[in-house]
Image (tube, helix red, strand yellow):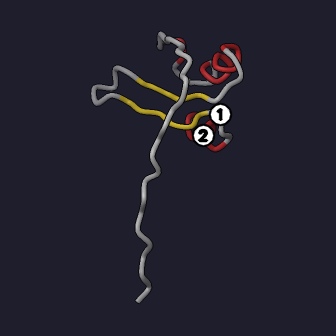
């Protein structure tokens, strides 16, 4: 729920979780490291999660095209 709220606010643009649930990646929209830490500190399990902050040059996430439904 916390991640979904941060996505709704536009602070997280995407995230992924490894199949073994051992790693989590998030693309966080922030002006600087302090802004990233502000978002990370809202994660409920942050006390059990070591983290590494890496600045991205860009993040291209292609849009997922879902065909429209026909009401016919």
Residue lying at 50% horizontally and 28% vertically, measured from the top left: 26
Give the side of residue 47 with respect to residue 36, left or right: left
Q: Nearer the viewer, residue 51 or 21?
A: 51
Give the side of residue 64 with respect to residue 43, left or right: left
Identify the element where label 1 is drawn.
loop
Q: Which x, y percent locates residue 5? A: 62, 40
- Please give the residue where the numbered disc 1 appears in the rendered image: 11
Residue lying at 38% horizontally and 30% vertically, measured from the top left: 17
- Please give the residue where the numbered disc 2 appears in the rendered image: 7
Q: Which x, y percent locates residue 38? A: 68, 19
Q: State yes or no: discs 2 and 1 in contact (Cβ < 8 Å).
A: yes
Identify the element where label 2 is drawn.
helix
Residue lying at 42% horizontally and 24% vertically, measured from the top left: 24
Q: Which quarter of the figure has residue 70?
A: bottom left
Question: Which residue extends farthest front?
Answer: 57
Q: Which x, y percent locates residue 47? A: 53, 12
Q: Tell me if residue 12 comes above or below residue 72 in the rendering.
A: above
Q: Nearer the viewer, residue 38 or 31?
A: 31
């Amino acid at each position: 729920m916390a991640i979904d709220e941060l996505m709704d606010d536009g602070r997280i643009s995407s995230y992924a979780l490894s199949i073994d649930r051992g790693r989590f990646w998030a693309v966080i929209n922030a002006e600087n490291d302090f802004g990233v830490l502000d978002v990370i500190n809202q994660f409920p399990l942050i006390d059990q999660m070591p983290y590494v902050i890496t600045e991205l040059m860009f993040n291209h996430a292609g849009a997922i095209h879902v065909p429209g439904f026909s009401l016919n």
